[in-house]
Image (spheres, rainbow, N blue to C red):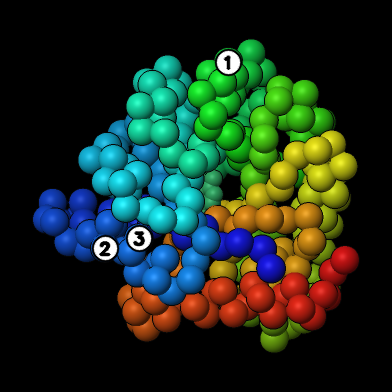
């Protein structure tokens, strides 16, 4: 099955909303790992709106699976990553006013800047993933820049699946969903053929994750908001276990090759 890395930013969002100590993302990371997830993902944003530097430092000490640090390709962030040494860095685009990461990294617009960050991090043994749209040219360029992984942005697929209504009940077949899903399939296959390891994420839910998790080229899924939202209702361990069960079943059923 694909591996599940849980993005715990929104635990910190809730903490920051009141300026209190709780809920604690460190305790959340422990529960996520106890539930069987394969990694912890956090985004240290330039404006520090949720995850703080001290969180990443502590996570580095306590995470037993994999710590994936999402960050912008800036000098400040590269310096922090080189100091903290996460198991993986995912370079993401960042706009101050956005609600969440909108769109993929514009690798074509600034390849030199991205390549510099990739080189500096990978030279110190930190493999880098580029969070990109499933666009063939961007995938090919990411391979040429030497990144170890790409993370395919599933946001367009996710939006299409939500617009269509409850996904599983309506079946797989809405035109917009199919188009976006097939772009992910083609992107994953192309990236894999170019020697890139393939991850995916953004906007994935309990309803729309299975088809993506079924793709054999995809090694990791990064899922945050929907798991934390469900955790409010059923608890974090249960929420993680439910997503893991969906991902396991998706590969077993092999609905997409
Ligand atoms: N992958 C990346 C690169 C992201 O920036 C995010 C959002 O922080 C996610 C995955 C997770 O997205 P969501 O919270 O919608 O599951």
For the point 81% across and 31% down, the residue is 140
Q: Which residue is mark 2?
A: 27
Give the labeled residue for mark 1. 116
| Left or right, residue 217 beside residue 151 | right
Secondary structure beneath label 3: helix
Can residue 37 be seen?
yes
Q: Is residue 229 above or below residue 108?
A: below
- Image coordinates for residue 227, horizontal then vertical, percent: 45, 69
Q: Residue at x 78, y 55 (%)?
A: 217
Specify the quadrant that holds the C terminus. bottom right
- Look at the image and tell me in which quarter the N terminus lies: bottom right
| Residue occupied by mark 3 | 29
Outermost residue on the bottom side: it is 169
* Disc 1 secondary structure class: helix
Residue 182, image quadrant: bottom right
Tell me if mark 1 has few (under 14), some (14-19) or many (20+) residues whose alpha carbon lies within 10 angstroms of its own. Answer: some
- Labelled pair 1, 2 in contact (Cβ < 8 Å): no
Q: Position of residue 196 (x, y in %)?
A: 75, 39
């Amino acid at each position: 099955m694909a591996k599940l890395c849980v993005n715990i930013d929104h635990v910190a969002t809730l903490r920051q909303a009141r300026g209190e100590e709780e809920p604690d993302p460190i305790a959340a990371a422990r529960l996520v790992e106890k539930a069987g997830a394969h990694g912890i993902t956090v985004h240290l944003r330039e404006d520090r709106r949720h995850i703080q530097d001290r969180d990443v430092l502590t996570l580095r000490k306590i995470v037993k699976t994999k710590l994936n640090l999402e960050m912008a390709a800036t000098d400040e962030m590269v310096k922090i990553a080189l100091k903290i040494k996460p198991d993986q860095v995912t370079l993401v685009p960042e706009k101050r006013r956005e609600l969440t990461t909108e769109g993929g990294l514009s690798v074509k617009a600034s390849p030199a800047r991205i390549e510099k960050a990739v080189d500096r991090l990978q030279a110190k043994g930190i493999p880098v993933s580029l969070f990109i749209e499933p666009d063939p040219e961007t995938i090919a360029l990411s391979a040429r820049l030497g990144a170890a992984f790409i993370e395919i942005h599933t946001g367009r697929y996710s939006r299409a699946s939500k617009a269509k209504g409850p996904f599983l009940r309506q079946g797989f077949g809405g035109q917009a969903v199919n188009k976006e899903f097939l772009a992910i399939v083609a992107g994953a296959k192309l990236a894999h053929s170019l020697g890139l390891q393939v991850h995916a994420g953004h906007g994935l839910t309990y309803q729309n994750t299975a088809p993506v998790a079924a793709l054999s080229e995809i090694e990791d899924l990064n899922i945050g908001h929907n798991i934390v939202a469900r955790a409010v209702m059923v608890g974090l361990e249960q929420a993680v276990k439910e997503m893991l069960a969906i991902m396991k079943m998706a590969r077993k059923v092999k609905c997409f090759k």
